[in-house]
Image (cartoon, rainbow, N blue to C red):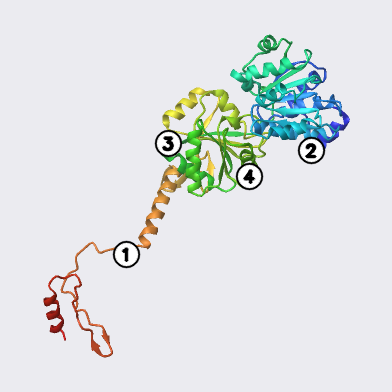
Amino acid sequence: MDKQFEQFFQQQSFKAPTAIQTAVYEPLKEDRSLIGLAPTGSGKTLAFAIPLLEKTVPGGNTQILVLSPSQELAVQTTDVFRQWGTVNHIKATSLTGGANMQRQIERLKKHPEVVVGTPGRMLSLIHESRLKLKDVQTIVVDEADELLNGETLDEVREIVMSAPVDVQLAFFSATQANTAEKLSETFGVDVEQFDVRKTDDTQGEVIHGLVRVAASKKVTYLRRLAKLKHFQALVFFNHVSTLEHVAAELKHQHVSSVKLAGHQVQTERATAMRLFRKGDAKLLLTTEMAARGLDIADLPAVVNFDLPQDATAYTHRTGRTGRMGNTGMVVNMGDDHDLRDLRKLIPEVTFKPLFLLHGKLTDQREVLTDDEGPEVTVNTEEIAETKEVETSANKVAATTTEKPTTKPTGKPKPVKAAFVGGKPKKKINRKKHSKKKGMRHKNIERYE
């Protein structure tokens, strides 16, 4: 590592490069095309940012292009390049859909050396001759297994075709959907593979938990999780319609939550991320779009409100917690059938039942001991539910006058008349709506 970058590396409190950072450093510096595979949260962004910045010439045109699958990841990667680009005065900018294109064009006029963005927006600006790639030396495809699928594959290929013939290609991901041989065939370059998934040791301890809950009770359970002290979680949904429905219910129940979905404008999405990162929101409701690359420091938990449909999605979702040695927890919600299917889908993961106990979410059951008998295992979730019901019943009882259920025995005591001014009250029977007006007057005269 260059001395200036090594000093900055130490100033950021990093002790040593991770496995992926060590593996791809020299190949990237030597302009070799490669694919890097490493677990989520293992420092893949710095793995390509540092060596590429070291060989970038300040004051030139765009030399590095980074393709990201989402606006949030593009902005996050841009921030990393800006931070580390201060070492050798390299400028970076982002180009994402949903943002003001004219502002992005104005930023391109300042000739940033690094451009990070989503393929669709980049391609639009290339077609308009606003983004020029004649000096591009390296194209990084981040979250490659996501971008090299369907329509985005065609967009990536067109961007690569617009760059110089000898451009260096670097693909990075946590899961492998394309082999080095397939990438070489698709893009016409020799691609080397560096896979450190088995040797990487950056991941912290993550508890993969199961919560058996009916579909109609999921929102209630989510509300209870949000009330836990120091709890914060990314909540994943398979469909935007379900996300919107749950978001409305949580808002009605005054639960601290924000949502992040593809149909939102960039300002709304940026605001949601800012509130969640600051800790002002306990829950961030999102879809698969937030499962890729987002780095949220010390995120305690990930909640699968809807269980993922494949193992790759599960890997990327759960990779948002337990990053860089921190502990984490994954809460998988579903009925018996759902949880059984999840175990079959990912047999290599050890799942544990989770319980709400003394204001904490834990994988440990509460065991009560009796001096005269054996240990008794208590389902704390059922206890919590029962307490809630009993508490609600007691509140109602406290504010309601109970009526006697048995008939009184013996003769009733005579009711004493209330006296005003020493005289008894006159018993007057005035029935305003009575048709027998004459009878009413007779009754009045009887008591006078």
Q: Earlier in the sequence, mark 2 or mark 3?
A: 2
Give coordinates of residue 205: x percent, y percent.
62, 34
Which residue is painted at 58% across and 45% down in the image? Answer: 282
Name the mark nearer the viewer: 2 or 4.
Answer: 4
Which residue is painted at 55% across and 23% down in the image? Answer: 311
Give coordinates of residue 158: x percent, y percent.
68, 16
Outermost residue, right direction? Answer: 3
Q: Mark on residue 401?
A: 1
Q: Earlier in the sequence, mark 2 or mark 4?
A: 2
Between the C-alphas of marks 2 and 3, the distance is 45 Å
- Residue 193 visible in this rendered orientation of the protein: no
Dot 3 amino acid type = Ala
Q: Mark on residue 215?
A: 3
Between the C-alphas of marks 4 and 1, the distance is 46 Å
Dot 4 amino acid type = Leu
Between the C-alphas of marks 1 and 2, the distance is 66 Å
Which residue position holds label 4? 275
Give coordinates of residue 223: x percent, y percent.
49, 45
Q: Secondary structure at mark 3?
A: helix
Q: Nearer the viewer, residue 168 or 364?
A: 168
Which residue position holds label 2? 12
Name the mark nearer the viewer: 2 or 3.
Answer: 3
Between the C-alphas of marks 3 and 1, the distance is 37 Å
Q: Earlier in the sequence, mark 1 or mark 2?
A: 2
Q: Earlier in the sequence, mark 3 or mark 1?
A: 3
Do the CB atoms of the residues marked 4 and 1 lie less than 8 Å apart? Answer: no
Name the mark nearer the viewer: 4 or 1.
Answer: 4
